[in-house]
Amino acid sequence: MGFGVFRFARDVDQNLLCSVCSAVLEDAVLTPCGHSFCLLCLETWLSRPGTNSCPECRAVCLSNEATPIHSIRNLINSLDIDCDYADRGCKAVVKVENLPQHRASCNFAPVQCAGCDLTINCYELPSHQVQCDGIAAVVSEVDDLLDKRGYRGYQAARSPEVSELACRVASLELQLRRMRQDLNLAESRNKKLERELVKTKEDLQEKRNQLLDQQYTDFDSDYDYGYAPHTIPKLSLLIARFLLAKPTYIDANRVFSAIKRCYDNYARCGEDYEHDVYMLTATANACNWFDDNQRRNIDSWLQSIARYRKLQRRA
C-alpha cells in the first residue's frame, strides 16, 4: 500500500500514484506492459486465485516479472512526508527514506499499558504507569510472591542476580496464574454458549413445528387414505412434506395403518396402483415417523413389491 497523498507537504505528481490504491507509490515496480504499482499492491492483486494480469490493462503479468523503478523510488524518497503518527500529535516532517527510522523512535507511537491495556503515546507510558492501578496491583502481587518464596531474605540481599531471578520467577508465576484464570473463564463461557446453542436449536425446532401446524390445518383428520385408489398419492405427498419433522397433530400409528391398507388393497391391482403403492412404501421407509417394528414391516412390503415388479417385467 502506498503513502497517502494528504501526508505530503507539496502536491504530488499524478504520475507517481498507484492505480490500485490511489496513493503515492511505495516500493515502485514496473510491469512488462509498462505500468507502475506499489510492490505490495501488485503482489496482493496477483495473489488472488486465477489472477495473472496487469491491474491496469489486463495484459498477462506475473509477480516475478515486475522490476523495481529505482528512479521513481529515489524521487519519492526525497519528498517530505508527515509522520505515521501525525493523528496522535506528532508534528515531525521527514524524508520518505527516513520514515522507517523515525517511526521506530517516534515518541507518539502507540503502546499498550501492561496493567490496564490502555493504548497511549509512547512518551506518556512512564508517567501513566506510575499512576496505573493495574501496574500497582501487579507489583503488589509480585511482592507478595517474593515474600512467600522467601526471596527477600539474606541470600537475595547478598546476590543481585538471585534477586533479579526471583523477581522474574514471581512475575512468570503471576502471568501463569492469570492465564489459568482466563482459561477457566473462557471454558465457562464456552459451556454457557453450548447450552445456549442447544436451547436455541430446540426453540427453532419448536417454532418450525408450530408454523407447520398453522400452515397445514387442512390435514384430513379422518385418515381415510387407502379406501380409494386416488388417496395413495395423497398419502405419499403428506409423508414427503414432513419427511423428517412430523407435525404433532399427525398420529404415526394411524398413518401406518393407512399404509398397510394401501398395501393390502392395491399392491397387486394393476400397474398404476402398484407403482403408487411402491412410491408410498419407499417414502414411508425414508421418513422417521415409525418405530422399529413398523419400519421392518414397511421395508418388507417395499421389498415384496420390488420382487413383484421384477417378475412382472420378466413376464
Image: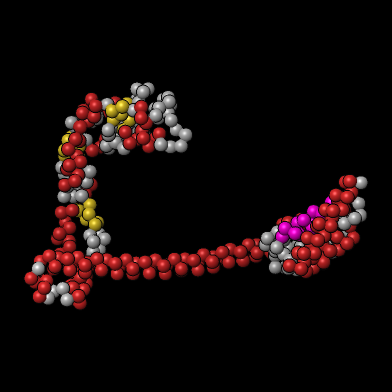
The answer to which quarter of the image holds residue 288 is bottom right
Q: Is residue 140 visible?
A: no
Q: Position of residue 250 (x, y in %)?
A: 74, 66
Give percent across and percent down for residue 121: 19, 53
Residue 134 placement (x, y as % from top left): 23, 67
Q: Residue at x 23, y 38 (%)?
A: 7
Query: Which one is in front, 76 or 194?
Result: 194
Which colour style is shown? secondary structure
278 in magenta: yes
Name, please, the residue furthest toward the left.
158
- Residue 20 falls left or right of residue 239: left
* Residue 265 falls left or right of residue 71: right
Residue 216 rendering spot, x and y as whole percentages: 72, 61
For this view, does 88 lie left or right of residue 223? Answer: left
Residue closest to the eye, 287 or 155: 155
**What is the chief secondary structure element of the magenta stretch?**
helix
Toward the viewer: 235 or 172?
172
The residue that appears at 20% across and 77% down in the rendered structure is 148
Q: Is residue 159 above or below residue 70?
A: below
Q: Which residue: 17% across, 76% down?
A: 150
**Residue situated furthest top in the rendering:** 33
- Give above or below for 82 relative to 231: above
When asked about the image quadrant of residue 269, the answer is bottom right
Q: Is residue 114 magenta?
A: no
- The magenta stretch is 275-287
